Amino acid sequence: MNNNNEPNQVLSVIESRSSGRAYSSEQLTQEELNVILKAGLMAPTGMNRQEVHFTVVKGDNPVLLELDEEKRRLRGQDKQLHNFYYEAPVLILLSAEDGFKWSRVDAGIAVQNMTLAAESLGLGTLIIGCIYDALNGERKDYFSELLQIPKGYSFQIALAVGHKTDNKPPHEYDFEKQVTMLG
């Protein structure tokens, strides 16, 4: 609560957010996309290295079909009802500099900033890690070239963004089990 006894907007966004697994075909506006990307770019990075790179891919780009097939092949999965990003109109892949010990953490902070920015705009998101092996495996160079991931960088995490059509509630948690308070 702030001084006016009004709910804190940031906390409200955090509490209302859930992972979207169904999206309409409505495209994001350039303004919406820019707000989300700016939120990621503004995320803190270890030693202010700013080593996270953002690759924006439209949901109908053929490289995503190839990536979905590679993910399923590596996992021994048959064709599924939905692709890994649930037909979201935009996928943002975050890659980061190889060899920097904070790259994975920095990408995680950036993706959380972007998720909260999207939620504040009324958009749905899904944080995606299931393609990590496909993008860092035997076909890494192939996918890195198609996705224009900079040399010396590796995929860390992705974010699907769109107009959510499911009404999945935010996840529940068990405060007593998940939190230890030391005096």
Image (cartoon, rainbow, N blue to C red):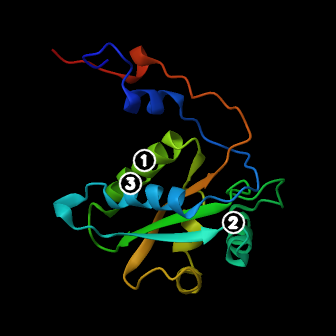
Residue 180 in picture, x, y percent from top left = 30, 20
Q: Secondary structure at mark 3?
A: helix
Q: Secondary structure at mark 2?
A: loop
Q: Specify whether residue 84 is in view.
A: yes
The C terminus - image quarter? top left
Q: CA distance from mark 2 to mark 1?
A: 20 Å
Amino acid at circle 3: Ala
Residue at image coords 53%, 29%: 16
Q: Residue 181 appears in which quarter of the rendering?
A: top left
Q: Residue 90 appears in which quarter of the rendering?
A: bottom right
On screen, residue 112 versus residue 86, left or right, reads left
Residue 58 in picture, x, y percent from top left = 65, 69
The tag earlier along the polypeptide, 2 or 1, is 2
Amino acid at circle 1: Gln
Q: CA distance from mark 3 to mark 2?
A: 21 Å
Q: CA distance from mark 1 to mark 3?
A: 9 Å
- Check the image and report above or below for 14 versus 28: above
Residue 39, disc? 3
- Label pair 3/2, CB-CB below 8 angstroms: no
Which is in the foreground here, disc 3 or disc 2? 3
Residue 175 in picture, x, y percent from top left = 41, 17
Q: Residues within 10 Å of mark 2 (few under 14, many from 20)?
A: many
Amino acid at circle 2: Gly
Question: Observer-nearest residue: 134 or 96?
Answer: 96
Q: Which residue is mark 1?
A: 112
The tag earlier along the polypeptide, 3 or 2, is 3
Which is in the foreground here, disc 1 or disc 3? 3
Q: Specify whether residue 131 is in view.
A: no
Q: Which residue is mark 2?
A: 59
Residue at image coords 38%, 33%: 10
